[in-house]
Image (spheres, coloured by chain):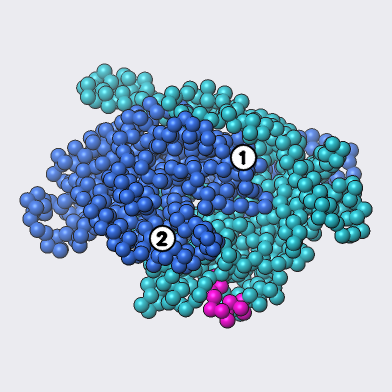
Chain colours: A cyan, B blue
Amino acid sequence: MSLLECRLERELLSTEEESAIAQVGKARELYQLSFSGRLGHDLPRHGNKEKINSGLKLSTSRHRFDRVDIGNQPVAPFEYLDFLETVVFPHTVNTFSTKFLGHMTAPLPEFITEVAGVISRMNQNQVKVETSNVLTLLERQVLGAVHHKIYRKQAGFYESYMQCPESCLGVVTGGGTLANITSLSYALNSAFRADGNFAGLTKEGLVSALNHYGFKDVVVIGSKRMHYSVDKAAKLLGLGERNVIRLETDSHGRVDLAQMRSNLEECRKGKIHVLALIGIAGATETGSVDPLEEIGALAAEFGVHFHADAAWGGAYTLSSNHRELVKGIEMADTVTICAHKQLYIPMGTSLCIFKSPGFASHSENNTAYQCKKGSYDLGRYTIEGSRPASILMLHALLNLWGDAGMGHVFDTTLSLTQNFTGKIKSSENFLLVQEPALNIVVYRYIPVTLREKVLTKEKLTYAEIELINEINKKIQSEQFINGNSFVSSTTLVNGEEEVVVFRAVFCNPLTRENDLDALLADQAKIARDIEIA
Amino acid sequence: MSLLECRLERELLSTEEESAIAQVGKARELYQLSFSGRLGHDLPRHGNKEKINSGLKLSTSRHRFDRVDIGNQPVAPFEYLDFLETVVFPHTVNTFSTKFLGHMTAPLPEFITEVAGVISRMNQNQVKVETSNVLTLLERQVLGAVHHKIYRKQAGFYESYMQCPESCLGVVTGGGTLANITSLSYALNSAFRADGNFAGLTKEGLVSALNHYGFKDVVVIGSKRMHYSVDKAAKLLGLGERNVIRLETDSHGRVDLAQMRSNLEECRKGKIHVLALIGIAGATETGSVDPLEEIGALAAEFGVHFHADAAWGGAYTLSSNHRELVKGIEMADTVTICAHKQLYIPMGTSLCIFKSPGFASHSENNTAYQCKKGSYDLGRYTIEGSRPASILMLHALLNLWGDAGMGHVFDTTLSLTQNFTGKIKSSENFLLVQEPALNIVVYRYIPVTLREKVLTKEKLTYAEIELINEINKKIQSEQFINGNSFVSSTTLVNGEEEVVVFRAVFCNPLTRENDLDALLADQAKIARDIEIA
């Protein structure tokens, strides 16, 4: 009913009914407030079409965001729009730029942003059937389809488990961190399950679990390239960060398997429970891929849970031409994949896929008003409660791009990576730090005065090492502020030495060769200016 | 550059460059796939304008979602659109209906869905400044503004802490469960912080922490109405569900304070660490509000962390006319508020507000590539990593609705609640189970044959109790399938007795009195049909 109809009808009604309708009329007005299609018409370019960044430092912008009384007086939509267009949008980061190569964020396909809009307009809640209905089935199907891409089980497996409420082939989470936490928490619940008089970790807690099972401690083992969410998981689960064992890597950033074996043996002797071996398929900092098959074999030999953190590289399983890049992933008991990274959907949707349909059974949640035993409610198996139906975006991507489309995009970004690596190798300004396994390149600028020494691999003094680190840090932060192009930066620790590097991430398939040239020229110019100063 | 321009340019280029451009051209095509504005034009009504639900049971729909080979062959957008419009959208749940009164989901204001669209199109990542820039400041500001609504500190407090990178007035999470987990985890990290030779829980884990601080165990204390996410937190943190102490309540669903005190005393004597007292401001099942001031006083007396789970009721602090409904909330050390509940933004955005700017300091995360000490990066203080800029929706709501708009909406939904409660009281079919504290009503249908006995409070036999429970369950599930109106159902445990009730949630301010009448008539008719059968 329109406001006008509402007013007309009012004449025929009692005073009480009238005031009720006035109330609804006002609520309806509040609901109809709109930017009339004018919001974000300039996006995704954020008002600065070429630039990554407007160049305003946060220390300068701070005062624009210092009022705590927002909301005391309502603001008209056009006034708010003006605020967004002058104070906010121009000073966000143009993550869609073809020269934004610093983080795991790429432009989104047009249809994905359309589906994103529909998801918020439907506002379903995936925690239970009563607020999602068939989207519950669709979520289970996408999890099943991704399970199939990884594990290639027979048709009968999926017939039995994919849509069976008592089984769970994976969960959707708000991000990779939660996916990793889910894997480690559920693996712990599964290892320390109810047994005899012991009611299980989930009921009795960690101290009782260790006593019952006769362990002194619990550790997680992986390489030094593990994502910091593993530390978060260890903190959360009460293991403590010191129980995350970070092993050395080879020159390709792959975990040292001999060290892994000797750690497993020591833990066995020392009555220490190994919660999981972690195999990285696309390290956040370097893109390195661990030898997943060998880790899988070790996990099987020692009877330990194997988690593949494929937040970045897991996407390659969705293209039959690229699955070899993460071969061995099918040996993992659980796999993390971030859909908001190389599956081109917006923040934040990740998956944790479970090899065994019964893996989550020791971690189930039930309540009286939802997630009852026997129900289809997905909340039975998730750490999170209320959740959006973001899985529909991944469903759309699988359908519209398909295996071939994914393959094309991966071909493009991998070929950009090779192209860029070649440019680094042939440049006198830069040094490649590690041969890229996937589509992340770590490299660094070498100051003119030190090039000879670096080329001949002469030993550098501490001051010289610091000099290289400092100039690389400076270049990166000035490049971000200038906003003409962007890579990120990290510090890799090799033995005693800290190595500051640039980190370029190639996941924008619309980037072209001239963008790469422009980026390197940008960095070289900034470097020269610093060196002269 | 358009595809045409791209083709024209091609003629002037070398073969190698040509093939690179062809590759980008194909990627661009994949990016330009679109539903051409046709997607969801029928939403938010989901194709069934009046109905809550299409009536198809999941057991019937299952076979439509049983293929695992989605994506093997890409599908054209129009074909996919057809699938969504026939197989998916009509069989979702119409959470925007004025007769959908079963869960904590309401229609979204038009401007909120517009902002939601922009958020996904910008695709910022709030974990760090390099992918969010001023949206980091805006998030800190909204957290500060909500902090101010709750705690009303002086202006100088917010000048010092709101935009200071070393302090944290709260975090944005993907949902209330994570907000509660954040509070309890950080409170534990803070209690078991580094001390002398002990490096802290975060480094050394729970077993060492208990040893160092001389505690035998850790418990959380609240009422039996606590949300199940508290159990999830206890499982995750290694405490175990048995260490969640669920106290009895009075007839209004408020926690028994005498029991709370005696539990605190017992724990003190028994060397058991009380991680937190939990005060509920709007219980999920009944809307009950605990006596927050008295719990706050107990927490202060015993030196215990006080967490207010105001996932539902915390929204009332945003209206100066309604803050009294959750009075005492300002005594809590941490407060959970779900923005996707009574703040009318889509799934899933919640807040955990910290009274003390230093509360999160023992839970900080740092890495070499982001979240470094001293940086503005919000990821330093969150359990989650990558996160969308969903805070912008809450910022828009605060600005466009403001205090007065929020107040109007709350007036409307509270008055609907009172109206509905009156109808239940005067109906011969239904019995009010508890006087509503906020805008959730629990009530039940009484079969004709038992009305006399129930009215005169005669003792019922076990079979009669079961009969009432069963018919209430049946009515609710048939009502959902029929799809003409909807309330949810839960089972309240009173001593030995299980009481199945309807749960009506009034958060849609567009609902009108005739919707309430229609809903009750719908239930009465279903009940009569069951009784006759």
State the image coordinates of residue B129 (x, y, percent, origin top left).
63, 41
| Image side of residue A104 versus residue A200, left or right | right
- Where are the magenta residues, as a range? A264-275
Marking on residue B234: 2
Please state the chain letter of the residue tagged with numbered disc 2 in the rendered image. Answer: B
Q: Nearer the viewer, residue A60 or A359?
A: A60
| Mark 2 crowd level (few <14, some 14–19, many ≥20, 10 Å Cα) | many
Please identify the quadrant where the C terminus of chain A is shown.
top right
Q: Is residue B87 above or below residue B330?
A: below
State the image coordinates of residue A18 (x, y, percent, origin top left).
26, 23
Q: Mark 2: which secondary structure? A: helix
| Image side of residue A8 versus residue A87, left or right | left
Q: Nearer the viewer, residue A434 or A218?
A: A218
State the image coordinates of residue B245 (x, y, percent, origin top left).
32, 60
State the image coordinates of residue A127 (x, y, percent, origin top left).
42, 53
Q: Is residue B150 above or below residue B276?
A: above
Residue at image location 16% in from the left, 41% down from the top:
B425
Q: Which residue position is annotated with label 1? A: B132
Residue at image location 83% in from the left, 39% down from the top:
A530
Q: Nearer the viewer, residue A333 or A259?
A: A259
